[in-house]
Amino acid sequence: MKLSHLVENIPPSPTLEITAKVNEKKEAGENVISFGAGQPDFDTPDNIKEAAHRAMLDGFTKYTAATGITPLKEAAAAQIKSSLGLDYNPGQIIVGNGAKQVLATAIMACCNPGDEVIIPAPYWVSYPEMAKMAGAKPVFIPLEAPTFDLDLTAVEKAITPRTRAIIVNSPSNPTGRVYSENALAGLARLAKKHQIWIITDEVYDFLVYGDNQHISIATIDPEIQKQTLVVNAVSKKYSMTGWRIGWGAGPKELIGAMGRIQGHYTSNPNSIAQKAALEALSGDQSSVEIMVRAFAERCKFIVKRLEKMPGLQLQKPQGAFYVFPYIGDIEQDDFSFCRDLLEEQGVALVPGSAFGAPGYVRISFATSLEEIAEGMDRMEQFLKSREG
């Protein structure tokens, strides 16, 4: 029996494949240190788990509105107002099964088959596949190495009559780049000039280091807010990756279209998880502060270690919890580099090619300092053996 051409052209998620391989090795008794997972190693805070428990005891286990419960939308709107200064009402917010589903639904709502979606590269692994699944064509714009700045001239050259959307991810997975206000303002001018939707993925907005500041492109001016979808989630900020709750805030026409799609694809997000997310957004925020301090400490530690290793070229991350060093002077094939490092030293990284950046590797520091120290020791030993 044949499958669709769509499925044949959609590869599995490389990051999830790495995680599965690491789990297999651990189950076989091997001592593996993984820097592949894009999720905090902290447990979900107790107050959030207790809210989920209460929801179950209260019988909150039935269908909700397809786009999510109103109190959660109000809480999301309140957090957006507090962090970005933007106003949204519940009718301008959709709650989905994680930010990933919200992003995919947005692309489906914006694009017809044959339309184009501009994606700056390096990119998160799922963006191109989301565009393809909507029948659209991903158009890649290389970011300027080594800093991974936006090249606005390249963006404008890539715009055609078929361009319907551009995806913005800041702070960035995988590079850790935080876009400046000037870069975002330039991108906003292009989007307004050519009437292009902007889909901005801001799930790492709480993790910014040093003097850097997270700025949402939706804040540039009131007009650009009208053609922008701001996407966020509880996954990273509250260590709730498995709860699968994210949301998008944008113009009512776009949110309405996304709601119609979601109503047929998934119905509502998990009712219990929605109650947990409501507590996350409206309850005690001290757990976030603890995680932010821990990630800042880990970032300094891992950067210090990597800067001393032979053959690596490294830009300090400005946000998120990834470092993205260039290893091309050591090994041109980043897949081979990661395979050999895993087999020889039991350290798992993600090849940069998975993010549209051959010659790089992504290292997640969303794990303990002890694990990071041991993993860096092993990686340094691996690199020294390559030198010899």
Image (cartoon, rainbow, N blue to C red):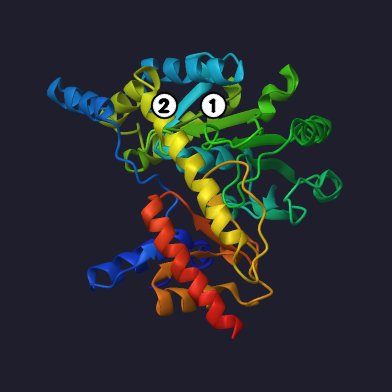
Q: Could you say where residue 20 lies in the image, as x and y percent from the top left?
A: 35, 64
How packed mark 1 is, by other alpha carbons closer than 10 Å (few <14, some 14-19, many 20 or more), is many
Q: Quadrant of residue 168?
A: top right
Q: Residue furthest left?
A: 57
When the figure is inspected, residue 88 is found, relative to residue 248, above or below; the finding is: above
Q: Quadrant of the N terminus?
A: bottom left
Quarter of the view holding residue 63: top left
Could one spot residue 353 in this view of the protein?
A: yes
Q: Is residue 190 left or right of residue 111?
A: right
Rendered location of residue 189, percent (x, y): 82, 31
- Residue at 59 percent across and 67 percent down: it is 309
Tell me the residue at 61%/77% (across/down). 333
Point 64% across, 66% down: residue: 312
Say whether disc 1 or disc 2 marks the residue closer to the N-terminus: 2
Residue placed at 36% from the left, 69% from the top? 21
Query: Which residue has dot 2 on it?
Result: 67
58 displayed left or right of 69 = left
| Of residues 157 and 182, the one drawn nearer to the viewer in this rendering | 182
Instruction: Indicate whether 48 appears above or below 377.
Output: above
Comparing 46 with 254, the one in front is 46
| For the residues bearing labels 1 and 2, Cβ distance under 8 angstroms | yes
Residue 212 screen position, x and y as percent: 66, 34
Is residue 7 shown left or right of residue 47? right
Q: Nearer the viewer, residue 106 or 348?
A: 348
The amino acid marked with disc number 2 is Thr
Residue 347, relative to residue 175: is it above or below?
below
Residue 86 x %, y %: 61, 16
Q: Which mark is residue 255?
A: 1
The amino acid on which the numbered mark 1 sits, given as a three-letter code, is: Ile
